[in-house]
Image: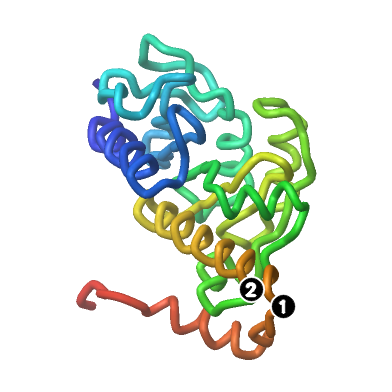
Amino acid sequence: MKMMAQRQQIVDYGLKLIRSGLTTGSGGNLSILCREQNLIAIGPSGIDYDEVGVEDVVIIDRSGHKVEGCWSPSSELSFHLALYDQRPDVSAVVHTHSVYATTMACLHWEIPAVHYLVAFAGKKVPLAPYATFGSPELADAVADSIGEHNALLLANHGLVAVGAEMRSAFNVAEEIELVARIYYQARSVGQPVLVDDAEMERVMEKFKSYGQQDDQ
């Protein structure tokens, strides 16, 4: 089978989506682009994450044609393809229906810099306008709205997070769900004071060297 390492990551991180409370059942989706092979590993449509094995992960090309796999790919394939075309720095996409981020999306609220951890996405988490799931219109809305951000709310739908690899994309999804919850709770009791642009610039720069770095 092609892309075995990426297939295994789709299985493993699908289970993490469930265990982290970022989605339920078969909601949301994950994909990984191998730019060297120009192939994408993406989860199958409508199968619960705890039932997906490596053999169930679908391999497609950059045009969306199936290369390997017995199932249909995720119904949101079109916006995964659009993101990879739009952002050459992105090689992994995580889409969730996490409760607090989705609450913001249903309110049609962007998530501002209520906490410095918004920097995982950028200076804010923007909002894409509503379009029917799986539609070309949604793919266009996602591609048009993502900009340089690493997370995007989909109106009345959920969250999309992107990264250079699956671990970073998943971390963005987790951290933005936390910030969405903080924003919801803060707005419930008052008007939160936002972190200013200059500080967010400093935080975003620090994040570039955050954590364990490879030896040079």
**Alpha-carbon distance for marks 2 and 1?**
6 Å
Q: Looking at the picture, how far across and down is residue 131, in whole percent?
A: 77, 34
Task: Please state if 124 lies on the left or on the right of 12 as rendered.
Answer: right
Q: Residue at x 58, y 51 (%)?
A: 87
Which of the 4 image quarters holds residue 155?
top right
Q: Residue at x 37, y 34 (%)?
A: 37
Above-or-below relation of 70 to 9: above
Q: Nearer the viewer, residue 28 or 92?
A: 28
- How many marks on residues? 2
x and y percent of residue 71 in the render? 41, 12
The residue singled out by tag 1 in the image is 190
Q: Residues within 10 Å of mark 2 (few under 14, many from 20)?
A: some
For image coordinates 36% across by 14% down, the residue present is 69
Quadrant placement of the N terminus: top left
Residue furthest front in the image: 189
Coloring applied to the structure: rainbow
At mark 2, the secondary structure is helix
Question: In which quadrant is the C terminus drawn?
Answer: bottom left
Residue 124: % across, % down: 66, 68
Q: From the viewer's perspective, tell me whether residue 101 is left or right of residue 105.
A: left
In this rendering, the answer to whether 137 lies above or below 187 is above
Q: Nearer the viewer, residue 114 or 90?
A: 114
- In this view, the residue in front, 34 or 151, is 151
Residue 9 visible in this rendered orientation of the protein: yes
Could you say which quadrant of the image residue 185 lies in?
Answer: bottom right
Residue that label 2 marks: 186
For badge 2, the amino acid type reads Ala
What is the secondary structure assignment of the residue under circle 1?
Answer: loop
